[in-house]
Amino acid sequence: MANATQRSRILNVLPDEEFFSRESDVQKLFNAGLDVARSLQPSCFLTGSRKSGKTEILKRVYNRLFWEQDTVIPFFHSLPKSLNSAEAFCREYFFRSILQFVGFLKKDPLLVMAEDFHFNRIIQLAYESKHSWLVEAVDNFQAYSHSKDLQVTAELAVHFPATASMKSGFRGFVILDDFHHIASLPSQDEMSLLAGNFLSALQSRQAPHLFSGSFKTVLKCLFKTAELPGNVDVFSLRPLQSTEAQVLFEGLCQRFDVPFEPDLSLYMVLQMDKNPFYLRTMVQAARRELLDFRTLRKFVELYTHELTEGNLHLYFDSLIHSTSLNPLEKIKALELLHLCTRRSPDFSAFRYFKNRENLEGYDFEKILSALDQITLIDYGLGVVTSVQDTVLKDWIEWNFAHKISGISMQQASYGITSKLLKRFNRSIQLRRYTDKMEQIRQVLLKMNCQTVPLAFFDYILFSAEQAIKEPKKPAASPQQAELTLPEIISATSVGTTSLGEADFSDQILVGKGFAAGSYSDDAETIWLVGYCPAPDVLGLEEVQRFYQKCQIVVQRDNLKSVKLWLLADNRFNQAALSFAQTHQVHTSNSTQFDRLCHVIMKRAPLPEEELQLEDLITYDMTIPLASDAELVAVRALEQIAENFEFDDKSKGQIRMALIEACINAKEAASSHAERIHLKFQTAPDRLITHLYFEPLPTKDALGHKEAAKGWSLKMLQTLMDDVRLSHTHHGLELAMTKYLRNVKREAV
């Protein structure tokens, strides 16, 4: 078997390190190729959006069929954008098929990749193959080619895989990429001739075809109908999911040594429409320009450059110039595209363009067909759908502003940068809001007649209690006022746009359930919950707006027995609280909500959360940044651990974890630091180790996620029951806990 390097040589397949999130699609089509051996697989069509990775998938399918099996002969042809003549196409198609046939039998990738098709070399390979039928086929093709009999040469070329299958005893699987380029033949008669032969070849079970291309163009030029024949399967290449595209983007950044901020990568991926081509283009541009994606502004500035004068601009510009539109028609095409970025053009827009075509001298139908053919618009049944591709929309709007409206290049570029930064800011706010609403929804669904402190739902009461004494635990004491929660059966989000323009925070969570554990009409209750992400103090206007939204929902859905609950991040002002009291609106800030979560969600406690200070015995020590200094700390910890009934395995894990942590700390501590501080705390059921050290100077400081990468946290987590790395006023702090009995692990 060939190694990965040899495999990548065939068809210039991307290295495995650069291919992400499409393995299942490759496997599906590879299995289809294997099914050909049992005559189970008919011809199939791979469809997907523009630049979604179809070509790379087909190359990988061919690679695997070439190297990983011996019963089905794979053929691969990628049609060029422009075909000069059917005769030249048939000659290349025929000779390339022969080279791939012989190359597969010999497992020789050099034959597959050959670009020159010398007749003497072809005939020599035919003789060496010891297949007499192959020699005869070459002679016949050459004879008909010399006599300019295109009809026979086209049949011999297109049907060669099926012929090879019948003569050799192997089955064939023909992969055709960009098949729609067959429509670029200048002669309509030649295109019809080739299309007819391919349509016939698709019927073969000996050598079925897997082809891809522009769906509409294939239908028009090959099938002359609006649907594929019943004997052709369709494999739809779905768009990447957000997480898959994020894995691709981050993997490419790591592959090309482009630093990035993991917390921001998802927003960048969504801006690039989760498109593999756009993502790769941006990462390669960052590498070329020695830039990074550590901040949104850096990403936006590079994106603007690529869109206005870089590779993204060249790509879209080349699509427009690949059409036969004249300069005036290209301007009108840009006007139509700009209209499509805002909405789907209605009939009035069509009439406007149509009425002016004679006056201005352009062919509107030609413009529509050209844009449809290069897949910049979707034009069918007389309707043009709006442009959904985010990157394409930005390119259209920039071009329109600069070339049609006459705005300067600098001004147009600033417009893109400004718009994107605002878009990112809104996206980040939306993500935070959505995450918070989902957290609230989960809390609602966990409500099941629990009794909790009323202070969790009353900001005035909570503030008064805080002013007297900060409670150590979220659980209620006998003196506290209490509230019995309902049992919530369902929690859904509803919009309330009746108050005006829709806003991302214009949502209400509707929790429906029963009070007091009684399933009756009288016990049915509804909780309407809102969240207002005010940065500082929540005022009267926000509370009134929430109340109005709730009234809309109550009246619209005819709700009875309703409770209102509004959450904020920080404080409520006095006017807001007065209104809330008057209208019976529960009020909670983030601290109240977090404490409710600890009760409702039964979250795992922090290492010291359920311990009283008097339960902890603390030992402090400091070690220098000297070689083997960690052994001194290990000796001290071993002595402390003697008072516990840890088994030998646990003692060994504690020892190894401390050694590893100290070594990591010495490597990460700044050069001017002289010591590492350690604190060992013991309680009846656990041993807690704290390690403090000064981090690198600010200019070299690692982000929290980058710092964690160098800390062998996964290893430490296998040794200890709880491991946390955090920033404190000491610097970086590592806290590791070993429980005397790890209940969770025993349960597993």
Image: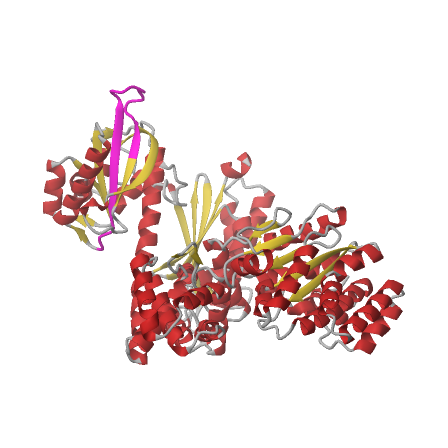
Residue 208: quadrant of the picture: bottom right
**Left or right, residue 523 beside residue 229:** left
Q: Position of residue 338 (x, y in %)?
A: 34, 66
Q: Position of residue 550 (x, y in %)?
A: 20, 38
**Left or right, residue 606 beside residue 64:** left
User: Is residue 533 visible to us here?
Assistant: yes
The vertical placement of 735 against 396, above or below, is above
Q: Position of residue 645 (x, y in %)?
A: 53, 39
* Residue 523 within the magenta-colored segment of the rendering: yes
> Which residue is more in the foreground, 310 or 722?
310
**Left or right, residue 180 beside residue 735:** right
Residue at the image position 36 percent from the left and 71 percent from the top: 332
The vertical placement of 716 against 391, above or below, is above
Quarter that holds the N terminus: bottom right
Residue 650: quadrant of the picture: top right
**Left or right, residue 671 beside residue 399:** right
> Which residue is more in the foreground, 285 or 159?
159
> Which residue is more in the foreground, 296 or 610?
296
Bounds of the magenta segment: 511-535
* Residue 429 within the magenta-colored segment of the rendering: no
User: Is residue 693 visible to us here?
Assistant: no
Quarter that holds the C terminus: top right
